[in-house]
Amino acid sequence: MLEGIFAVIAGYLLGSIPAAYIMCKLRKGIDIRNVDVHNMGAGSTFRQCGIWEGAIVAVVDIGKGAAAVLLAQFVGADYLFVLAAGFAALLGHNFPFAIGFKGGQGVSTVMGVFFILAPQAMLLMLVVMAVVLLITRHIFTMIFIVAPFLPLFMWICGLPGSLVLFSLLIVVYIIFRSRGRLRELRFLQGHKKEV
């Protein structure tokens, strides 16, 4: 039990590392949450700071989710606590304590969680994400279209039902939390926007 509690707290703290905020402050002197689409993530960093800066943020954000799960497994936390640590990392990204609990969407952090828990399914997701992004040329639209495939791919890969359900809950949570951005969806617009 203590190992599990430690893993969840550590997961939140790892998720709370505001990579996009730090990068954009250092490179451009801006608060990424107040520009672009007001999302503290790799996509906004790509657009506001540059390709390399966005890539670094993406790697850090993915690493946060992966590290949370690996740490939980390393300390011997029960399986449900491992899942909870992954979700805590997402919450940390959404609500980072160090910058007023105003964070980002958390897609990259979730990817990190599932790269550890379900690598086969995530490889399939990466292929679909690449194809859809090439077609839509819009990150948020790609995420909205591709996200529901995650539980499906986990089921196809024969992963445990508890993990399939966990992935479904994560997808529903992210879509619900991003509901205010639905107007950005490419297929609901009559004009194109930049990625």
Image (cartoon, grey):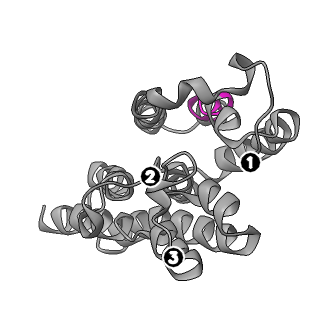
Look at 66% across and 73% down and name the residue there. Answer: 53
The magenta span reads 145-153
The answer to which image quadrant residue 138 occupies is top right
Most prominent secondary structure in the magenta stretch?
helix
Mark 1 burial class by Cα count in 10 Å: few <14, some 14-19, many 20+: few
x, y (%) of residue 161? 45, 31
Name the residue carrying label 3.
Answer: 29
**146 above or below 118?**
above
Residue 76 in the figure: left or right of residue 49? left
Q: Secondary structure at mark 3?
A: loop
Please, what is the three-letter code of the amino acid marked with disc 2? Answer: Gly
Look at 24% across and 64% down and name the residue there. Answer: 97
Please, what is the three-letter code of the amino acid marked with disc 1? Answer: Leu
Please, what is the three-letter code of the amino acid marked with disc 3? Answer: Gly
Which residue extends farthest bottom? 26
Name the residue carrying label 1.
Answer: 126
Name the residue carrying label 2.
Answer: 104
Residue 151 lies in the magenta stretch:
yes
The reply to whether residue 51 is visible in this rendering is yes
Q: Nearer the viewer, residue 159 or 45?
A: 45
